[in-house]
Amino acid sequence: MSSTSRAAIAAVALLHSSEVFAQSAGANIELPVINVEAARAAGSLTAPGIADQRRQLDQTPGSVSFVDAETYQNTYAATLRDTLAETPGVFVQNRYSQEIRLSIRGSGIARSFHTRGIEILQDGVPTNLADGSGDFYQIDPLSLRAIEVFRGGNALPFGGSTLGGAINAVTPTAHTATAPNMVRIDGGSFGTVRAQGAVSRVLGPWDFAISGTYTHSDGWRQHERQDLGQINGNVGYRFSDRLETRFYFGAYYTDVKLPGSVTYGQAMNNPRLANAGAVSGDQARNTYVQRLANVTTIRLDVGQLDLTSWAIHKQLHHPIFQVLDQDGWTYGFSPRFTGSFNLGGFRNDLIVGARIFAGNNAVQQFLNLGGARGAMTVNGRQVASNYEAWFENRFFVLPEVALTFGAKAFTAERRYEAMTNLNTPAPVRYDAAVTYSGFNPRVGLIYEPLRDIQVFANVTRSADVPDFTDLTQQTSRPGAFVPLKAQNAWTYEAGTRGRYDRFAWDVTLFRSELRNQMLQYNTGPGIPASTFNAAQTRLQGIELGASIDLARNLTGHDDSLTLRQVWNYSDFRFVNDAVYGNNVIPGVPQHVLRTSLTYSHPAGFSVTPTLDIVPEGAFVDYRNTFRVGGYALLGLQATARLPNGANLFLDLRNLTDRRYISDFGPVVQYNAASTATFYPGTGRSIYGGLRYQF
């Protein structure tokens, strides 16, 4: 067990950092160590212990995954790509710095920036803006205790009903932290330095945890320098065994230079090269985000009521093709009841929730003069409001068989008020609004033939509402309002997960029939993607994760050798489209595999070689004339526990220095000379660090 402290990080390394954790409520009883561990395992009303979280997740009649943050703490985990590398069904590709492309079951498949179609939550509280768009910068992997992944309609208990589902990043409290104090320093290739610290305490009915991380890197490519600061914390107060409240707070700072995209030839022959326009325009992404949330939990005789409220303030300064300046607020309130009771002599579990959240964002655009503001081109306001209600019911017809049915109803409004083309003699005014509404039902079944083994199947309807990146596009008129239809899908899935003796598995087959899927294509170098509705598409595939303990007690000292395999198979294509026929939708390779082999010794030593394979790259264009090459990346991770309880780790990546394409933005028709839409994968790199918990 281990982790947390408080570390003052200074000067160039601003902040404190994250991971956490706690002493416990019965520390004045005899045998304090036993009581501390028991309390940590139990958690509290507002934040259940890790074992309880995993148990609740396993009751989901669908495809879900649980990641204990301790499994990646002794690596250079910098993004969700690092934390979810062995999670089936999740496709994450690095572009540069902290920018990634995240897709689950084809959600946002063609968007190579930010996220759409997946709810990103922290401690059950949305981090997405009110229009549904989201970033990843405030999710600090080092500050987490666990990550929950709800693929597709399995996110309904949180109110999620998008194609991709939801990812919930769980930060530790003083009751769930693996140690009261933690300090950490790591770094490596490309001038990378990262410092972290965390501390947590239980003080009678009060408890608190705070962590902070500072990261600096010069970047692998030209013009890729980054400085990041992240603070996460929470304070809880227990009124009684039936009432507890917890305040979460966070502050996040991002200063990132953007190297931009290049042609395929440039990416493969000179992969460290930056896009010339990105350099001359000093393209960058600077964000300042503050977040405050509250979760108050009331335990009732038949269940539990959680009252959640939140507010997020975000400022963005973003010199790209133009200089984008934005300043906005998002705020919301969500009550949720979870209960279990007998119904006609049968067990019945019920979740009922609602969510009201809204936001407004002042948006301005200027001509980019070497990274500085030129003449204003757009001056406007984006307003989003959402009203949602949902329920999910699990009725156990037998102790080991449950039928599930649920639904979500929603109304979402998007309003845009702006003056555009301000730098021309003919400005254009927009005062536009569009309202989306829908009803998304869900039915399913879960069967548990043996303890820790589940078989499940379900059918879910999803809806994805366009965000303002989709609705305000860069056509001949910057900031033009382009009304789009909502994306709808019926998804069918069946699978099994469990553990038996030396084997563990998580396998799901899914098929989604979509109407009006939102797809993008690049309109030119440095110009954000335009969005259109595809009439009918089909997304289907297999999500597989498995492990086997190949050997136990190899040397007579309780050591082990474990093989893990992840395989994502994706068949995403148009259906009888008037232009593209049954072509494959570009963006995601058909096969993505990851294999790892871990040798662990109880003395605290482990070594893990990894192999990431994409046998054949994804199509780049909608006409399916060109696809990027496949690749195999070899890595190695090693960790050792030192005599004083500290952990030393080494993380080696792309050991063969393979040149490959990590990500790209789709285009209509590939042209070798002019299609500059590719992001080269990072070359050989080495990271290491020291982590001390006490």
Image (cartoon, rainbow, N blue to C red):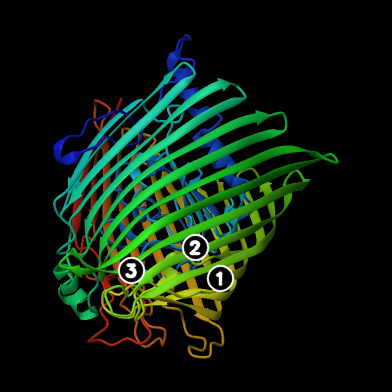
Discs 2, 1 touching: Cβ within 8 Å:
yes
The residue under the point 18% across, 77% down is: 266
Q: Nearer the viewer, mark 3 or mark 1?
A: 3
- Label 3 secondary element: strand
Q: Which mark is residue 378?
A: 3
- Label 2 secondary element: loop
Q: Is residue 519 above or below residue 288?
A: below
Label 2, on which residue? Answer: 117
Label 2 packing within 10 angstroms: few (<14), some (14-19), many (20+): many
Q: Is residue 641 left or right of residue 90?
A: left
The residue under the point 54% across, 41% down is: 54
Give amino acid for label 2. Answer: Gly
**How far across and how far down the image is residue 497, in percent?**
57, 53
The residue under the point 23% across, 56% down is: 256
Q: Is residue 388 above or below residue 649?
A: below
Quarter assignment of residue 642: top left
